[in-house]
Image (cartoon, rainbow, N blue to C red):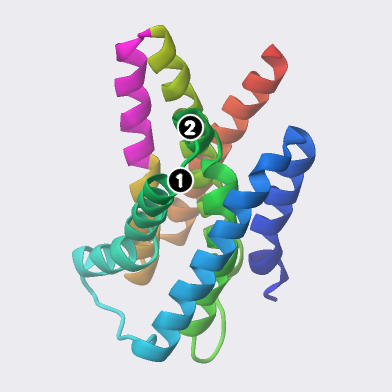
Amino acid sequence: MLLFLIFLLPCALLTYSFISKDKKIILPVFAGLITASIVCACRYFFSYEHRLIYSSFGQNFAYYLIKQDFLPLLIVSLVYALISRDCAEYKFKNFFPLLTSFFAVYLPYCVITSSEIYYQAYDLFLKPIIYLAMLTQIALCLVNIWNSLTSGKIVFIVLDVLIIILYAIYPAVSDALYAIDYSFALILVIGILYSLLPLVFLIIKIARK
């Protein structure tokens, strides 16, 4: 049951490594894995993972945004950017291996520790797809931002930043909607559309090369 959840992000990372053929991704991958291991260990030993599901969308949204989504995404990126002595271009272009390796450990941990009895199809299948779509879209936007910075296209930078914010926040929205038993059919449709957009952009980008 857990195979898709556990192996989706590692498989995506492995595919990325084969396509990019860049040995420099080893460091961000290693950094993401180590960071995730430390965070998971700290959560396991110093916090209570099981919680009551709130009936309020806002309370659930805040929980998922802080613990599983935007805050980990932001902190890991900022810490790596501050610690790493590599150039800005390297940091921008290695967002995907860094955060995908992090969430490859962190996301299964969050799902497994939050479920006491059984796992839902949403957590096992749709959730990892949504997180992969988030990481892919943000990575594509960061590359676009770097290219726009070098060419001085400010309008495109603003657009990419807005897309990043939207994609960074939506996983928490989806989790919160599911937690309050919102229409699963609607959550599924929005999740599929949300996940297909980065795939379309990626195919277009590859086709242009």
Total numbered labels placed on residues in the image: 2
For discs 1 and 2, the disc positioned in front in the rendered view = 2
Q: Earlier in the sequence, mark 1 or mark 2?
A: 2
Q: Are marks 1 and 2 in contact (CB under 8 Å)?
A: no
As drawn, 55 above or below 9: below
Q: CA distance from mark 1 to mark 2?
A: 37 Å
In the rendered image, residue 169, in percent from the top left (x then y), is placed at 33, 49
- Does 167 sit left or right of 102 as displayed? left
Q: Residue at x 72, y 36 (%)?
A: 22
Q: Which mark is residue 190?
A: 1
- The range drawn in magenta is 152-166
Q: Nearer the viewer, residue 54 or 208?
A: 208
Quarter of the figure that contains the C terminus: top right
Q: Residue at x 41, y 81 (%)?
A: 42
Callout 1: SS: helix
**Residue tagged by mark 2?**
87
Give neighbour class at mark 1: few <14, some 14-19, many 20+ (Cα, 10 Å). Answer: some
Q: Name the amino acid, label 1.
A: Ile
Callout 2: SS: loop
